[in-house]
């Protein structure tokens, strides 16, 4: 099949809440939270470069993969996301109530982008988010939608150090990608990244 030469677009953001993570076990919610209105996702790599010098040259270099950090811009965060992930509560009158004691849950995040040949679906296996800024503006000559931006960090999950996976249209697992958290089909543990390598972008 043809390979993409370019990529563009962002859509189909799905959130899988991490319900339990302890030792060698991680449990995701069976049902995804769909987050419509994706505007922009920017991720920068996290990790240090360590260079060993010998013979008056950089003799050996090692790069630690600590995941990514960045921003997810959404048209409007849903009530389901605010209550299930951001830890806010809905009272009997339907109000969404934020508290200083809210506990933000970690989650996996799936999304996709287009290419000139095939679409690509991605998953970040463990994401933590901060509270979004709350901005409003008056209506002038035209209505300009105000978006909401989450600062996020994608970190290696504790069970196997996986950070990210992606799969292109036409491959096994693509059509069911949003049904549950995609788990890679690897032959053995030697196929998993070691602590300092992880998965590339």
Image: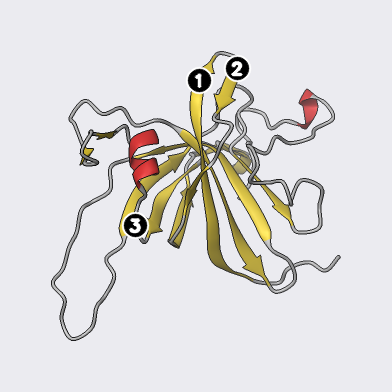
Out of 172 and 98, give the one closest to the viewer. Answer: 98
Q: Residue at x 75, y 71 (%)?
A: 117
| Mark 1 neighbour class, 10 Å CA radius: few under 14, some 14 to 19, many 20 or more | few
The image's colour scheme reads secondary structure
Instruction: Give the number of the disc on residue 20.
Output: 1
Real-space CA distance between mark 2 and mark 3, rounded to the nearest whole angstrom: 33 Å
Residue 76 bears which disc, if any?
3
The residue wearing badge 2 is: 25
Mark 1 or 2, which is nearer the eye?
1
Name which residue lies at 18% across and 29% down.
Answer: 100
Could you say whether the residue bearing mark 3 is in a helix, strand or loop?
loop
Q: Provide the secondary structure element on which disc 1 rests.
A: strand
Q: Is residue 70 above or below residue 21?
A: below
**Left or right relative to 73: residue 29:** right
- Whole-angstrom CA distance, mark 3 to mark 1, is 27 Å
Q: Position of residue 113 (x, y in %)?
A: 60, 62
């Amino acid at each position: 099949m043809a390979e993409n030469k370019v990529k563009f677009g962002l859509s189909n953001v799905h959130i899988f809440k991490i319900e339990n993570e302890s030792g060698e076990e991680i449990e995701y919610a069976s049902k995804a939270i769909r987050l419509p209105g994706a505007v922009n996702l920017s991720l920068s790599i996290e990790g240090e470069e360590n260079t060993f010098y010998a013979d008056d040259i950089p003799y050996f270099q090692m790069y630690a993969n600590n995941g990514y950090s960045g921003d997810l811009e959404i048209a409007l965060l849903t009530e389901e996301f605010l209550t299930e992930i951001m830890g806010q509560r809905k009272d009997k009158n339907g109000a969404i109530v934020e508290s200083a004691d809210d506990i933000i849950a970690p989650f996996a995040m799936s999304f996709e982008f287009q290419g000139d040949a095939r679409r690509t679906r991605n998953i970040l296996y463990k994401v933590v988010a901060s509270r979004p800024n709350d901005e409003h503006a008056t209506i002038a000559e035209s209505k300009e939608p105000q978006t909401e931006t989450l600062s996020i960090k994608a970190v290696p999950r504790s069970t196997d150090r996986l950070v990210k996976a992606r799969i292109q249209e036409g491959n096994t697992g693509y059509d069911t990608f949003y049904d549950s958290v995609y788990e890679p089909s690897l032959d053995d543990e030697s196929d998993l990244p070691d602590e300092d390598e992880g998965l590339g972008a």
